[in-house]
Amino acid sequence: MNAHLQSAPKHTLGKFPVNGSGWAWNTSTPEPAPGPEPSRERETAMFAIRCVIPSLYLLIITVGLLGNITLVKIFITNSAMRSVPNIFISSLAAGDLLLLLTCVPVDASRYFVEEWIFGEVGCKLIPAIQLTSVGVSVFTLTALSADRHKAIVNPMDIQTSSAVLWTCIKAMAIWVISMLLAVPEAVFAEVAHINDTDNVSFTACIPYPQTDELHPKIHSIMIFLVYYLIPLTIISVYYYHIAKTLIKSAHNIPGEYSEHSKRQMETRKRLAKIVLVFVGCFAVCWFPNHVLYMYRSFNYSEIDPSLEHLIMTLVARVMSFCNSCVNPFALYLLSESFRRHFNSQLCCRRKRRRERSTSYLLSSSAIRVTSIKSNARNTVTSTTLLNGHSLRQEASL
Protein backbone atom coordinates (compact mmCIF):
# COMPACT_ATOMS: atom_id res chain seq x y z
CA MET A 1 0.00 0.00 0.00
CA ASN A 2 1.23 3.48 -0.85
CA ALA A 3 2.65 5.61 1.91
CA HIS A 4 0.15 8.40 1.35
CA LEU A 5 -2.67 5.90 1.93
CA GLN A 6 -1.14 4.56 5.09
CA SER A 7 -0.88 8.01 6.60
CA ALA A 8 -4.22 9.34 5.36
CA PRO A 9 -6.30 11.05 8.06
CA LYS A 10 -9.50 9.28 8.88
CA HIS A 11 -11.74 12.29 8.33
CA THR A 12 -10.34 13.60 5.07
CA LEU A 13 -12.72 14.07 2.17
CA GLY A 14 -12.78 12.43 -1.20
CA LYS A 15 -9.82 10.17 -0.68
CA PHE A 16 -11.38 6.73 -0.71
CA PRO A 17 -14.08 5.91 -3.25
CA VAL A 18 -16.91 3.71 -2.03
CA ASN A 19 -17.58 2.12 -5.38
CA GLY A 20 -15.67 1.11 -8.44
CA SER A 21 -16.84 3.92 -10.66
CA GLY A 22 -15.31 6.36 -8.24
CA TRP A 23 -18.59 8.19 -7.74
CA ALA A 24 -19.45 7.25 -4.15
CA TRP A 25 -16.70 8.73 -2.06
CA ASN A 26 -15.92 8.81 1.62
CA THR A 27 -18.00 11.85 2.56
CA SER A 28 -17.60 11.56 6.29
CA THR A 29 -17.50 14.78 8.25
CA PRO A 30 -14.12 16.56 8.09
CA GLU A 31 -12.45 16.92 11.43
CA PRO A 32 -12.21 20.57 12.49
CA ALA A 33 -8.81 22.14 12.37
CA PRO A 34 -7.05 22.51 15.72
CA GLY A 35 -7.44 25.83 17.46
CA PRO A 36 -10.61 27.90 18.05
CA GLU A 37 -14.06 26.37 18.18
CA PRO A 38 -15.68 25.64 14.82
CA SER A 39 -17.48 28.55 13.25
CA ARG A 40 -21.24 28.76 13.14
CA GLU A 41 -21.13 28.14 9.38
CA ARG A 42 -19.27 24.89 9.87
CA GLU A 43 -21.69 23.79 12.58
CA THR A 44 -24.59 24.50 10.23
CA ALA A 45 -22.90 22.52 7.49
CA MET A 46 -22.32 19.57 9.80
CA PHE A 47 -25.98 19.60 10.82
CA ALA A 48 -26.98 19.55 7.14
CA ILE A 49 -24.68 16.63 6.44
CA ARG A 50 -25.93 14.54 9.36
CA CYS A 51 -29.65 15.30 9.08
CA VAL A 52 -30.76 17.09 5.93
CA ILE A 53 -28.77 15.07 3.37
CA PRO A 54 -29.89 11.60 4.58
CA SER A 55 -33.46 12.92 4.64
CA LEU A 56 -33.02 14.09 1.06
CA TYR A 57 -31.72 10.66 0.11
CA LEU A 58 -34.80 9.09 1.69
CA LEU A 59 -37.00 11.42 -0.35
CA ILE A 60 -35.15 10.46 -3.55
CA ILE A 61 -35.60 6.76 -2.81
CA THR A 62 -39.32 7.14 -2.00
CA VAL A 63 -40.17 9.28 -5.01
CA GLY A 64 -38.02 7.19 -7.36
CA LEU A 65 -39.56 3.90 -6.24
CA LEU A 66 -43.10 5.25 -6.53
CA GLY A 67 -42.58 6.67 -10.00
CA ASN A 68 -40.56 3.83 -11.55
CA ILE A 69 -42.61 0.98 -10.05
CA THR A 70 -45.81 2.63 -11.29
CA LEU A 71 -44.26 3.13 -14.71
CA VAL A 72 -43.22 -0.50 -15.04
CA LYS A 73 -46.61 -1.70 -13.74
CA ILE A 74 -48.48 0.38 -16.31
CA PHE A 75 -46.41 -0.95 -19.20
CA ILE A 76 -46.73 -4.57 -18.01
CA THR A 77 -50.46 -4.61 -17.21
CA ASN A 78 -51.69 -2.63 -20.25
CA SER A 79 -51.23 -4.42 -23.54
CA ALA A 80 -51.86 -1.20 -25.47
CA MET A 81 -48.72 0.27 -23.87
CA ARG A 82 -46.40 -2.54 -24.96
CA SER A 83 -44.68 -0.77 -27.82
CA VAL A 84 -41.06 -0.60 -28.93
CA PRO A 85 -40.28 2.72 -27.18
CA ASN A 86 -42.10 1.67 -24.02
CA ILE A 87 -40.08 -1.53 -23.70
CA PHE A 88 -36.88 0.50 -23.68
CA ILE A 89 -38.38 2.97 -21.19
CA SER A 90 -39.39 0.06 -18.92
CA SER A 91 -35.83 -1.24 -19.07
CA LEU A 92 -34.62 2.25 -18.18
CA ALA A 93 -36.94 2.29 -15.16
CA ALA A 94 -35.70 -1.15 -14.06
CA GLY A 95 -32.11 0.13 -14.09
CA ASP A 96 -33.14 3.14 -12.00
CA LEU A 97 -34.88 0.85 -9.50
CA LEU A 98 -31.73 -1.21 -9.18
CA LEU A 99 -29.71 1.89 -8.34
CA LEU A 100 -32.31 3.25 -5.90
CA LEU A 101 -32.60 -0.02 -3.97
CA THR A 102 -28.88 -0.72 -3.63
CA CYS A 103 -26.45 2.13 -4.20
CA VAL A 104 -28.46 5.03 -2.80
CA PRO A 105 -28.96 3.47 0.68
CA VAL A 106 -25.28 2.52 0.79
CA ASP A 107 -24.24 6.04 -0.10
CA ALA A 108 -26.63 7.50 2.49
CA SER A 109 -25.10 5.29 5.18
CA ARG A 110 -21.77 7.06 4.71
CA TYR A 111 -23.20 10.10 6.53
CA PHE A 112 -23.84 8.02 9.65
CA VAL A 113 -20.91 5.59 9.65
CA GLU A 114 -17.35 6.64 8.80
CA GLU A 115 -16.08 3.16 7.93
CA TRP A 116 -17.07 0.67 5.25
CA ILE A 117 -19.53 -1.68 6.95
CA PHE A 118 -20.69 -3.85 4.03
CA GLY A 119 -17.73 -6.22 3.93
CA GLU A 120 -15.71 -7.60 1.05
CA VAL A 121 -18.76 -8.89 -0.82
CA GLY A 122 -20.52 -5.54 -0.60
CA CYS A 123 -17.36 -3.76 -1.72
CA LYS A 124 -17.31 -5.84 -4.89
CA LEU A 125 -21.06 -5.89 -5.60
CA ILE A 126 -22.00 -2.23 -5.03
CA PRO A 127 -19.51 -0.82 -7.60
CA ALA A 128 -20.62 -3.37 -10.20
CA ILE A 129 -24.31 -2.70 -9.54
CA GLN A 130 -23.95 1.06 -9.86
CA LEU A 131 -21.91 0.84 -13.04
CA THR A 132 -24.42 -1.67 -14.45
CA SER A 133 -27.27 0.75 -13.73
CA VAL A 134 -25.47 3.66 -15.36
CA GLY A 135 -24.64 1.48 -18.37
CA VAL A 136 -28.26 0.38 -18.73
CA SER A 137 -29.38 4.02 -18.61
CA VAL A 138 -27.00 5.48 -21.16
CA PHE A 139 -27.03 2.50 -23.56
CA THR A 140 -30.85 2.31 -23.45
CA LEU A 141 -31.08 6.03 -24.19
CA THR A 142 -28.81 5.45 -27.18
CA ALA A 143 -31.04 2.59 -28.36
CA LEU A 144 -34.14 4.77 -27.90
CA SER A 145 -32.55 7.53 -29.97
CA ALA A 146 -31.70 5.01 -32.69
CA ASP A 147 -35.30 3.80 -32.67
CA ARG A 148 -36.64 7.36 -33.02
CA HIS A 149 -34.11 8.01 -35.80
CA LYS A 150 -35.37 4.98 -37.69
CA ALA A 151 -39.03 5.92 -37.19
CA ILE A 152 -38.61 9.51 -38.37
CA VAL A 153 -35.72 9.47 -40.84
CA ASN A 154 -36.68 6.14 -42.44
CA PRO A 155 -40.48 6.00 -42.00
CA MET A 156 -40.94 3.81 -45.09
CA ASP A 157 -39.33 0.82 -43.36
CA ILE A 158 -41.96 -1.77 -42.60
CA GLN A 159 -42.29 -2.62 -38.91
CA THR A 160 -42.69 -6.38 -38.67
CA SER A 161 -44.94 -8.19 -36.22
CA SER A 162 -41.87 -9.42 -34.34
CA ALA A 163 -40.62 -5.88 -33.61
CA VAL A 164 -41.65 -6.09 -29.96
CA LEU A 165 -39.87 -9.43 -29.52
CA TRP A 166 -36.68 -8.09 -31.10
CA THR A 167 -36.86 -5.01 -28.88
CA CYS A 168 -37.06 -7.24 -25.78
CA ILE A 169 -33.97 -9.09 -27.00
CA LYS A 170 -32.13 -5.79 -27.53
CA ALA A 171 -33.08 -4.60 -24.04
CA MET A 172 -31.80 -7.86 -22.52
CA ALA A 173 -28.59 -7.55 -24.54
CA ILE A 174 -28.04 -4.06 -23.11
CA TRP A 175 -28.31 -5.48 -19.59
CA VAL A 176 -25.86 -8.28 -20.37
CA ILE A 177 -23.34 -5.88 -21.93
CA SER A 178 -23.67 -3.49 -18.99
CA MET A 179 -23.04 -6.29 -16.50
CA LEU A 180 -20.03 -7.56 -18.43
CA LEU A 181 -18.50 -4.09 -18.57
CA ALA A 182 -18.96 -3.82 -14.80
CA VAL A 183 -17.13 -7.09 -14.05
CA PRO A 184 -13.70 -5.40 -13.67
CA GLU A 185 -15.19 -3.20 -10.95
CA ALA A 186 -16.09 -6.30 -8.94
CA VAL A 187 -12.76 -7.97 -9.65
CA PHE A 188 -10.46 -5.13 -8.59
CA ALA A 189 -12.46 -3.49 -5.78
CA GLU A 190 -11.16 -4.35 -2.32
CA VAL A 191 -11.53 -3.40 1.32
CA ALA A 192 -8.38 -1.67 2.52
CA HIS A 193 -7.33 -1.20 6.14
CA ILE A 194 -5.94 2.30 6.52
CA ASN A 195 -3.97 3.80 9.40
CA ASP A 196 -4.60 7.47 10.10
CA THR A 197 -2.18 9.98 11.59
CA ASP A 198 -3.13 8.87 15.11
CA ASN A 199 -2.22 5.30 14.17
CA VAL A 200 -5.90 4.28 14.37
CA SER A 201 -7.00 1.73 11.79
CA PHE A 202 -10.21 2.04 9.74
CA THR A 203 -11.56 0.37 6.62
CA ALA A 204 -12.46 1.83 3.22
CA CYS A 205 -13.67 0.33 -0.05
CA ILE A 206 -11.27 1.25 -2.86
CA PRO A 207 -12.00 0.54 -6.55
CA TYR A 208 -8.61 -0.81 -7.61
CA PRO A 209 -5.24 -1.83 -6.13
CA GLN A 210 -3.38 1.27 -5.03
CA THR A 211 -0.15 0.57 -6.93
CA ASP A 212 0.35 3.86 -8.74
CA GLU A 213 -1.47 7.02 -9.75
CA LEU A 214 -1.82 6.11 -13.43
CA HIS A 215 -4.59 3.58 -12.83
CA PRO A 216 -7.18 6.08 -11.47
CA LYS A 217 -6.46 8.50 -14.33
CA ILE A 218 -7.03 5.83 -16.97
CA HIS A 219 -10.08 4.56 -15.10
CA SER A 220 -11.75 7.98 -14.87
CA ILE A 221 -11.11 8.77 -18.55
CA MET A 222 -12.51 5.43 -19.70
CA ILE A 223 -15.58 5.84 -17.50
CA PHE A 224 -16.19 9.32 -18.92
CA LEU A 225 -15.77 8.17 -22.52
CA VAL A 226 -17.75 4.91 -22.40
CA TYR A 227 -20.57 5.99 -20.10
CA TYR A 228 -20.96 9.63 -21.08
CA LEU A 229 -19.16 11.28 -23.97
CA ILE A 230 -19.34 8.60 -26.69
CA PRO A 231 -23.03 7.67 -26.14
CA LEU A 232 -24.08 11.33 -25.99
CA THR A 233 -22.13 12.04 -29.18
CA ILE A 234 -23.94 9.21 -30.97
CA ILE A 235 -27.28 10.46 -29.65
CA SER A 236 -26.45 13.98 -30.86
CA VAL A 237 -25.80 12.67 -34.37
CA TYR A 238 -29.12 10.83 -34.34
CA TYR A 239 -31.01 13.93 -33.25
CA TYR A 240 -29.24 16.11 -35.78
CA HIS A 241 -30.66 13.94 -38.57
CA ILE A 242 -34.05 13.78 -36.82
CA ALA A 243 -34.20 17.58 -36.67
CA LYS A 244 -33.27 17.88 -40.36
CA THR A 245 -35.97 15.39 -41.34
CA LEU A 246 -38.66 17.10 -39.26
CA ILE A 247 -37.83 20.50 -40.75
CA LYS A 248 -38.09 19.08 -44.26
CA SER A 249 -41.31 17.20 -43.51
CA ALA A 250 -43.00 20.43 -42.40
CA HIS A 251 -42.79 21.66 -46.00
CA ASN A 252 -43.13 18.38 -47.87
CA ILE A 253 -46.11 16.30 -46.70
CA PRO A 254 -47.59 13.89 -49.31
CA GLY A 255 -50.97 15.16 -50.50
CA GLU A 256 -52.59 11.73 -50.69
CA TYR A 257 -52.10 11.05 -47.00
CA SER A 258 -52.04 14.66 -45.83
CA GLU A 259 -54.07 14.39 -42.62
CA HIS A 260 -52.77 10.95 -41.76
CA SER A 261 -49.16 11.96 -42.37
CA LYS A 262 -49.56 15.00 -40.15
CA ARG A 263 -50.90 12.89 -37.29
CA GLN A 264 -48.15 10.33 -37.76
CA MET A 265 -45.42 12.97 -37.78
CA GLU A 266 -46.86 14.70 -34.70
CA THR A 267 -46.86 11.38 -32.83
CA ARG A 268 -43.27 10.66 -33.76
CA LYS A 269 -42.19 14.19 -32.87
CA ARG A 270 -43.77 13.80 -29.45
CA LEU A 271 -41.96 10.51 -28.83
CA ALA A 272 -38.67 12.00 -30.03
CA LYS A 273 -39.19 14.93 -27.65
CA ILE A 274 -39.72 12.55 -24.71
CA VAL A 275 -36.50 10.67 -25.48
CA LEU A 276 -34.62 13.95 -25.88
CA VAL A 277 -35.81 15.10 -22.44
CA PHE A 278 -34.61 11.79 -20.94
CA VAL A 279 -31.21 12.28 -22.56
CA GLY A 280 -30.99 15.89 -21.38
CA CYS A 281 -31.79 14.90 -17.79
CA PHE A 282 -29.13 12.19 -17.87
CA ALA A 283 -26.50 14.54 -19.32
CA VAL A 284 -27.16 17.30 -16.78
CA CYS A 285 -27.47 15.05 -13.73
CA TRP A 286 -24.34 12.94 -14.31
CA PHE A 287 -21.97 15.59 -15.69
CA PRO A 288 -20.88 17.01 -12.29
CA ASN A 289 -20.03 13.52 -11.00
CA HIS A 290 -17.89 12.71 -14.02
CA VAL A 291 -16.02 16.01 -13.74
CA LEU A 292 -15.50 15.58 -10.01
CA TYR A 293 -14.22 12.02 -10.43
CA MET A 294 -11.70 13.05 -13.09
CA TYR A 295 -10.54 15.97 -10.95
CA ARG A 296 -9.92 13.64 -8.02
CA SER A 297 -8.26 11.02 -10.19
CA PHE A 298 -5.77 13.53 -11.56
CA ASN A 299 -5.09 14.89 -8.07
CA TYR A 300 -5.16 11.57 -6.29
CA SER A 301 -2.24 12.23 -3.93
CA GLU A 302 -3.77 15.49 -2.70
CA ILE A 303 -6.60 15.80 -0.19
CA ASP A 304 -9.08 18.66 -0.22
CA PRO A 305 -10.65 18.86 3.26
CA SER A 306 -12.46 22.15 2.56
CA LEU A 307 -16.16 22.63 3.15
CA GLU A 308 -16.60 23.83 -0.44
CA HIS A 309 -15.28 20.53 -1.76
CA LEU A 310 -17.68 18.66 0.49
CA ILE A 311 -20.64 20.71 -0.76
CA MET A 312 -19.67 20.09 -4.38
CA THR A 313 -19.45 16.37 -3.64
CA LEU A 314 -22.89 16.31 -2.06
CA VAL A 315 -24.45 18.28 -4.92
CA ALA A 316 -22.91 15.94 -7.50
CA ARG A 317 -24.11 12.84 -5.63
CA VAL A 318 -27.65 14.13 -5.17
CA MET A 319 -27.90 15.20 -8.82
CA SER A 320 -26.76 11.79 -10.07
CA PHE A 321 -29.28 9.96 -7.89
CA CYS A 322 -32.05 12.38 -8.85
CA ASN A 323 -31.67 11.16 -12.42
CA SER A 324 -33.15 7.84 -11.26
CA CYS A 325 -36.45 9.44 -10.32
CA VAL A 326 -37.02 12.22 -12.90
CA ASN A 327 -38.00 10.10 -15.92
CA PRO A 328 -41.50 9.18 -14.64
CA PHE A 329 -42.16 12.87 -13.96
CA ALA A 330 -40.99 13.85 -17.44
CA LEU A 331 -43.18 11.14 -18.95
CA TYR A 332 -46.14 12.30 -16.86
CA LEU A 333 -45.78 15.86 -18.16
CA LEU A 334 -45.17 14.97 -21.80
CA SER A 335 -47.39 11.92 -22.38
CA GLU A 336 -51.15 12.24 -22.09
CA SER A 337 -51.61 8.47 -22.29
CA PHE A 338 -49.14 7.75 -19.47
CA ARG A 339 -50.61 10.57 -17.38
CA ARG A 340 -54.07 9.04 -17.73
CA HIS A 341 -52.85 5.57 -16.73
CA PHE A 342 -50.79 6.98 -13.84
CA ASN A 343 -53.78 8.88 -12.47
CA SER A 344 -55.91 5.75 -12.72
CA GLN A 345 -53.33 3.87 -10.62
CA LEU A 346 -53.58 6.49 -7.86
CA CYS A 347 -57.37 6.57 -7.74
CA CYS A 348 -58.28 3.16 -9.16
CA ARG A 349 -61.20 2.45 -6.81
CA ARG A 350 -62.98 5.70 -7.53
CA LYS A 351 -62.47 5.25 -11.24
CA ARG A 352 -63.86 1.70 -11.19
CA ARG A 353 -67.07 2.85 -9.52
CA ARG A 354 -67.43 5.67 -12.04
CA GLU A 355 -66.80 3.35 -14.98
CA ARG A 356 -69.38 0.82 -13.74
CA SER A 357 -72.09 3.47 -13.41
CA THR A 358 -71.20 5.02 -16.76
CA SER A 359 -71.26 1.65 -18.47
CA TYR A 360 -74.72 0.88 -17.07
CA LEU A 361 -76.20 4.24 -18.14
CA LEU A 362 -74.79 4.10 -21.65
CA SER A 363 -75.46 0.46 -22.42
CA SER A 364 -78.66 1.12 -24.39
CA SER A 365 -77.08 3.94 -26.38
CA ALA A 366 -74.11 1.75 -27.19
CA ILE A 367 -76.42 -0.88 -28.72
CA ARG A 368 -78.07 1.68 -31.00
CA VAL A 369 -74.85 2.96 -32.46
CA THR A 370 -73.13 -0.42 -32.89
CA SER A 371 -73.41 -0.39 -36.67
CA ILE A 372 -72.17 3.21 -36.89
CA LYS A 373 -69.19 2.46 -34.65
CA SER A 374 -68.40 -0.64 -36.68
CA ASN A 375 -68.31 1.34 -39.91
CA ALA A 376 -66.22 4.05 -38.28
CA ARG A 377 -63.81 1.47 -36.92
CA ASN A 378 -63.31 -0.01 -40.35
CA THR A 379 -62.66 3.46 -41.76
CA VAL A 380 -60.13 4.31 -39.07
CA THR A 381 -58.38 0.97 -39.53
CA SER A 382 -58.03 1.52 -43.24
CA THR A 383 -56.61 5.02 -42.76
CA THR A 384 -54.14 4.07 -40.05
CA LEU A 385 -52.41 1.47 -42.16
CA LEU A 386 -49.37 2.75 -44.02
CA ASN A 387 -46.73 0.52 -45.61
CA GLY A 388 -47.98 -2.54 -43.78
CA HIS A 389 -47.92 -1.37 -40.15
CA SER A 390 -50.24 0.47 -37.77
CA LEU A 391 -49.64 3.60 -35.76
CA ARG A 392 -50.50 1.66 -32.59
CA GLN A 393 -46.82 1.05 -31.96
CA GLU A 394 -46.12 4.78 -32.30
CA ALA A 395 -49.12 6.22 -30.45
CA SER A 396 -48.93 4.19 -27.25
CA LEU A 397 -47.37 7.14 -25.43
Image (cartoon, rainbow, N blue to C red):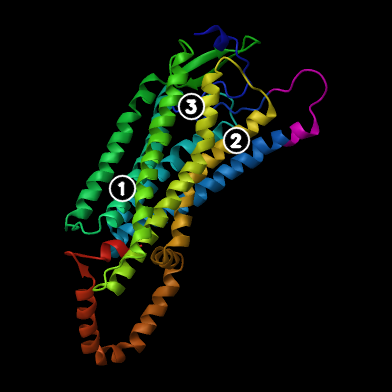
Q: Write down the quadrant of residue 218 in the picture.
A: top left
Q: Amino acid at mark 1?
A: Ala
Q: Amino acid at mark 2?
A: Leu
Closer to the camera, 29 or 15?
15
Q: Nearer the viewer, mark 1 or mark 3?
A: 1
- Give the CA distance from mark 1 to mark 2: 34 Å
Is disc 3 placed on a helix, strand or loop? loop
- The residue at the point 81 percent across, 25 percent down is 37
Q: Which residue is mark 3?
A: 22
Q: Is residue 2 above or below residue 76?
A: above
**158 displayed left or right of 221:** left
- Give the CA distance from mark 3 to mark 2: 14 Å
**300 displayed left or right of 222:** right
Q: What is the x, y in percent for residue 272?
A: 38, 56
Predominant secondary structure in magenta?
loop
Closer to the camera, 2 or 381?
381
In the image, which residues are magenta? 31-44
* Label 2 neighbour load within 10 Å: few <14, some 14-19, many 20+: some
Q: Which residue is mark 1?
A: 146
Q: What is the x, y in percent for residue 201?
A: 57, 13
Circle on res. 28: none
Q: Nearer the viewer, mark 1 or mark 2?
A: 1
Is disc 2 placed on a helix, strand or loop? helix
Name the N-terminal-most of marks 1 and 3. Answer: 3
Q: Is residue 74 visible?
A: no
Q: Are marks 1 and 2 in contact (CB under 8 Å)?
A: no
Q: Amino acid at mark 3?
A: Gly
Q: Is residue 296 above or below residue 290?
A: above
Closer to the camera, 175 or 190?
175
Q: Is residue 378 above or below residue 38?
A: below
Q: Which residue is mark 2?
A: 314
